[in-house]
Amino acid sequence: MSDVTRIAELVQWRRSGAARHIRRASGLNASRIARAIGVAQSAVSQRERALPAPQSPYALRYYRAAAELCFMVSDS
């Protein structure tokens, strides 16, 4: 999957609220995701509320973290 496709999917997750739902369903808080991708907790919260789109390279880090959580949640 290309980076452009990944970012487009992330934008859809943000708009639908799926990004926050996936994180919460996995039992993780925004602070833990923020530490994992190297941003402030407020940046994760802003992204999940569909505030300004994440910028590369953080957009891809966030996408990868959210995608991993999605797989973890769907396997439960």
Image (cartoon, grey):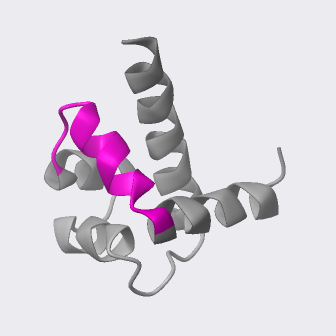
Q: Is residue 56 left or right of residue 38?
A: right
Name above or below for residue 59 compared with residue 25: below
Name above or below for residue 32 compared with residue 59: above
Is residue 20 in the magenta section? yes
- Say if residue 57 shows up in the picture: no
Looking at the image, the residue that sits furthest to the front is 16
Q: Which residues are magenta?
A: 16-29
**Residue at (84% x, 52% y) in the render:** 2
Which quadrant would the C terminus be assigned to in this image?
A: top left
Name above or below for residue 69 compared with residue 59: above
Residue 68, percent from left and from top: 48, 31
Q: In front here: 67 or 18?
A: 18
Residue 43, percent from left and from top: 29, 73
**Residue at (27% x, 30% y) in the render:** 26
Looking at the image, the residue that sits furthest to the top is 76
Looking at the image, the residue that sits furthest to the bottom is 52
Among the 4 quarters of the image, the one containing residue 24: top left
Is residue 63 in the magenta section? no
**Residue at (29% x, 77% y) in the render:** 46
Which quadrant would the N terminus be assigned to in this image?
A: top right
Q: In front here: 34 or 68?
A: 68
- Say if residue 48 shows up in the picture: yes
Taken as a whole, is the magenta stretch helix, strand or loop? helix
Q: Is residue 20 left or right of residue 24?
A: right
**Residue at (34% x, 67% y) in the render:** 48
Among the 4 quarters of the image, the one containing residue 45: bottom left
Q: Is residue 1 left or right of residue 55?
A: right
Residue 40, percent from left and from top: 23, 68
Residue 50, percent from left and from top: 41, 78
